[in-house]
Amino acid sequence: MNNAAYFEQGISFTVYMEEFERAVAEKRTSGPDQSEFMVHYTLLNLHRMHRLTKHTGIIPSLQQKIQAWERNLRILIITEFWCGDAAQNIPVIEKALSPNKRIDIRYVFRDEHPELIERYLTNGGRSIPKMIVMDAGTGADLFTWGPRPAAAQAEITRMKEAAFSKDAMIEGIQRWYIADKTLSMQAELETLFS
């Protein structure tokens, strides 16, 4: 299946959030791993998504770039509810890009489409979120982004090299995101949409 077909199967941010809310209410998550750990992170991520959607201000230079953007785009975001990086970055992507009606964003779940994520591996891994930006007319990939800002990736690499435990890495990257206040993500969007 080509990316245009995945895009057509994708859901809007509104539907994505409705399904997210339903999953939390039903004490489950997306994907096959329904462990207590994953369900717990889904609840945390929903709170993060609401907080960031409500409180994130988009920097003026990024707002101007997106307002001036004239090319029709289709953006496909591969994600899952349990993913902490998705919870931190999707609200910023949505808030920055959705005001321009030339940019249409849809969401698909990684574990429902393993063949899709296999096309967009990060260092050999199925890391998410992954943003695929396509020309709306031709369907051609223009660029991809993900799974996290470069500075966050550097922090992950540092923690791995220092042999941090999984829990310590989760806490460490959360602290990084809090301190960064979405500025790295916004700067990367500004560069991508130049």
Image: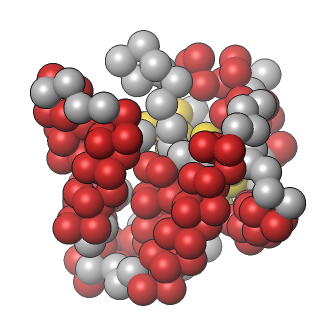
Rendered-image quadrant of the C terminus? bottom left
Can residue 2 be seen?
A: no
> Could you tell whether 41 is left or right of 52 in the image?
right
Tell me what residue is drawn at x 67 percent, y 33 percent: 110
Residue 133, percent from left and from top: 51, 44
In the image, 31 versus 89, the foreground residue is 31
- In the figure, residue 72 lies in which quadrant? bottom right
- Residue 68 lies, in percent from the top left, at 38, 74
Q: In the rendering, at what x and y percent does residue 1 appear? A: 78, 22
- Which residue is the extreme one toward the top? 124
Can residue 21 be seen in the rendering of this structure? yes
Q: Which residue is drawn at the image coordinates 13% and 27% (left, top)?
A: 162
14 lies above or below 35: below
Q: Give the colour scheme shown.
A: secondary structure
**Image position of 65 (left or right of 121):** left
Which of the pair 128/96 is nearer the observer? 128
Q: Quadrant of residue 188?
A: bottom left
> How many numbered marks are there?
0
Q: Is residue 79 above or below residue 32?
A: below
Residue 58 x, y percent position in the rendering: 34, 80
Q: Residue at x 51, y 38 (%)?
A: 128
Whether residue 32 is situated above or below residue 131 in the rendered picture: above
Residue drawn at x 15%, y 23% is 161
Which quadrant would residue 8 be assigned to in this image?
Answer: top right
